[in-house]
Image (cartoon, rainbow, N blue to C red):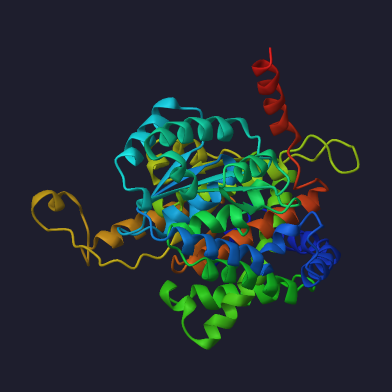
Amino acid sequence: MRYDYTNGGIHEADIQKKAELLHEYRKILVDGVDEKNHSMPEAALVAPFDTAHLYRAEEIARRIGVVRHLVLVGIGGSSRGTEAVYHALKKPDTPLLHVLDVIDASHVHGVCDLLSKTELHDFAIVIVSKSGTTTETIANTDLLLSKLFKVFGDDIYGRTVCVSDPSSPLQSYATKYGIETADIPETIGGRYSVFTAAGLVPLALLGFSVRNFVAGGAGVIAQADADHGVFTLAKIFHALMSSLLLPLENVVAGKAVEVQRKILCTNVPVMAASLHVLLAQKGTHTHLIFAQDPRLEGFSLWYQQLLAESLGKKEAKNGEDAPSTMMPFCMTPRELHSTAQMYLSGAPVYTQFISAERSEKDQSISKDGFGSLLEIKGARSYARVGSAIQEGVRAAYVKASMPHTAYDIALLTEKSMGEAMAQKMLEVIYTAHLMNIDAFDQPHVELYKKETRTLLNT
């Protein structure tokens, strides 16, 4: 993983001071993870070390077997973690993932029609709802299973798994119908649940190595815990400069470089959280998540929810008004010819560039035909064009002195995705602590749910 930043006028000494404010809190998290404290609000950091989640997911995947289609019924944190990993890692032989996350009868009917023409052993259904009463999820589940019951009878329940809080109505109903269940711990909310059965069960059914995924997350958290001392800018910059002087593919090769990579993984969430808070205090209103690699668009959407629901609060923990934060938006290279004009014109934007190395065989651009319309000196490589655009955007940000970070994943694997998601969880948890807000509630999401229930009961 390679990480770089332009601080947009924030002084390094101020970043240092903010980082030092996390010192005691990080020690508390160390103790909580070491003790496997499942009752602390930050219990999501314990989840990768709880093998019960992993073993349950593997057990379910072994029983159901290899599938061609997986239907995931869930919304927000119940589906976005799985989607992030799926879109980053899917290959031609990966099962097709169908997500039912909004009220859209035509989409549900389309999935039903597809499965009705598919052998029962070739598909599985996973229903994920933390509360077990999520309106969109329960409505879609009822429509889906009632239609498929007419085709497959009771056998459809044997291809279905419900993942929820162990005491939820959904779990009780699933047990009544002989549907297999898996638990989401009571203290872990949906947007932090990707290392629990909420993420591991569908990922295992999709054929991904959940062991490597969990190992990646656990490794980042363990390493962050091991180095909970005062943030040292000199240490970070030495590691940054050493890695940035190397080709990206070498960042994960060789002992010396591996040590540097671990240093970066340890400190990046601290640095990112400190920079985030300082930029918000300075008046930066927008946090732009720029997935420069299309495979990471799902990851950016997962990260957007993590940021928005965790940091978007009206009140601080002491009851006072919460400090200003930034509104997160997602962007891809498609927006370079639309909204980028506004961002590069000097709008108060903080951008996180997220990209990954590509390993597929490169293609060449011809010197005749349509290729002749491109002026390229040197190697006429398709990958080179993509890299030039990617680096060109970042160079434009540097020239404009726009605050940004560059988060480059050396190679997309289950392990590296686990690392990336654990890092983002740490970053958001640290940011919330610096802002003195609760990173784990979502009172205003509950408002629309309450109003929906009111309308349905009148």
Q: Position of residue 221 (x, y in %)?
A: 68, 68
In the image, 42 versus 366, the foreground residue is 42
Residue at 75%, 45% (x, y): give it.
Answer: 281
Q: Position of residue 296 (x, y in %)?
A: 46, 53
Residue 420 found in image quarter:
bottom right
The residue furthest right is 318
The residue furthest left is 368
Q: Say whether residue 392 is left or right of residue 238.
A: left
Q: With respect to residue 216, does 182 lie above or below?
A: above
Q: With respect to residue 250, does 393 lie above or below?
A: above
Q: Position of residue 291 (x, y in %)?
A: 47, 51
Residue at 68%, 67% (x, y): give it.
Answer: 50
Q: Is residue 397 visible?
A: no
Q: With respect to residue 35, does 63 lie above or below?
A: above
Q: Say whether residue 305 is left or right of residue 10.
A: left
Please give the count of numbered marks on the rendered protein: 0
Residue at 67%, 52% (x, y): give it.
Answer: 184
In the image, 315 versus 138, the foreground residue is 138
In the image, 13 versus 157, the foreground residue is 157
Q: Say whether residue 428 is left or right of residue 262.
A: right
In the image, 93 versus 149, the foreground residue is 149
Residue at 61%, 76% (x, y): give it.
Answer: 262
Q: Say whether residue 57 is left or right of residue 365.
A: right
